[in-house]
């Protein structure tokens, strides 16, 4: 079963910087008209400058999970209109996207990340 895609972004990792916590990095991805910043947790998935990524937000669990390097579900931290950007949490890992992606408050989304090879 193919999940209905709410938002799909393709971009390149522009920077990977050490975070304040041990084993944490802050990853910045830029694409055509958007920027996404998120925490990367050591041992979960590693990212390098120049990696080309596909980020997919769906309302249902994708059936082809093996193609992704990371997949998790979460919710908006606050309505996009209030935040002025998308603040999305997957198990406490925050993904911040500018401009807002148009996700709906109170809806459970799956976020899957694929490194393009």
Image: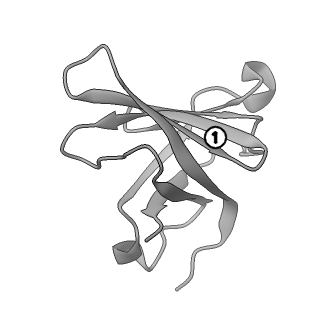
As drawn, which residue projects farthest toward the top? 20
Residue beneath the point at 51% across and 57% down: 53
Residue beneath the point at 43% across and 62% down: 115
- On screen, residue 76 above or below 56: above
Residue beneath the point at 39% across and 73% down: 65
As drawn, which residue projects farthest toward the front? 50
Q: Nearer the viewer, residue 34 or 73?
A: 34
Q: How many marks?
A: 1
Residue 97 place in picture, x, y as percent: 65, 35
Residue placed under numbered mark 1 in the picture: 106
Q: Is residue 111 visible?
A: no
In the rendered view, does 11 fall on the left or right side of 27? right
Residue 3 picture quarter: bottom right
Residue 106 place in picture, x, y as percent: 63, 40
Looking at the picture, the colour scheme in use is one colour
- On screen, residue 66 above or below 50: below
Residue 45 place in picture, x, y as percent: 29, 49
- On screen, residue 100 above or below 9: above
Tell me the quarter of the image containing the C terminus. Answer: bottom left
In the rendered view, does 91 fall on the left or right side of 42? right
Q: Nearer the viewer, residue 63 or 36?
A: 36
Residue 80 picture quarter: top right
Residue 9 place in picture, x, y as percent: 65, 56
- Local secondary structure at mark 1: loop
Q: Callout 1: few (<14), some (14-19), or many (20+) C-alpha neighbours within 10 Å?
A: few
Residue 79 picture quarter: top right
Q: Is residue 24 visible?
A: yes
């Amino acid at each position: 079963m193919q999940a209905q895609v709410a938002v799909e972004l393709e971009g390149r990792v522009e920077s990977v910087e050490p975070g304040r916590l041990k084993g944490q990095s802050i990853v910045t991805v830029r694409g055509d008209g958007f920027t996404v910043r998120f925490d990367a947790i050591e041992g979960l998935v590693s990212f390098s400058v120049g990696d080309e990524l596909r980020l997919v937000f769906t309302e249902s669990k994708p059936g082809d999970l093996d193609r992704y390097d990371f997949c998790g579900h979460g919710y908006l931290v606050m309505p996009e209109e209030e935040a002025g950007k998308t603040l999305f949490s997957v198990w406490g890992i925050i993904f911040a996207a500018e401009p807002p992606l148009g996700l709906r408050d109170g809806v459970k989304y799956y976020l899957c990340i694929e490194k393009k090879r």
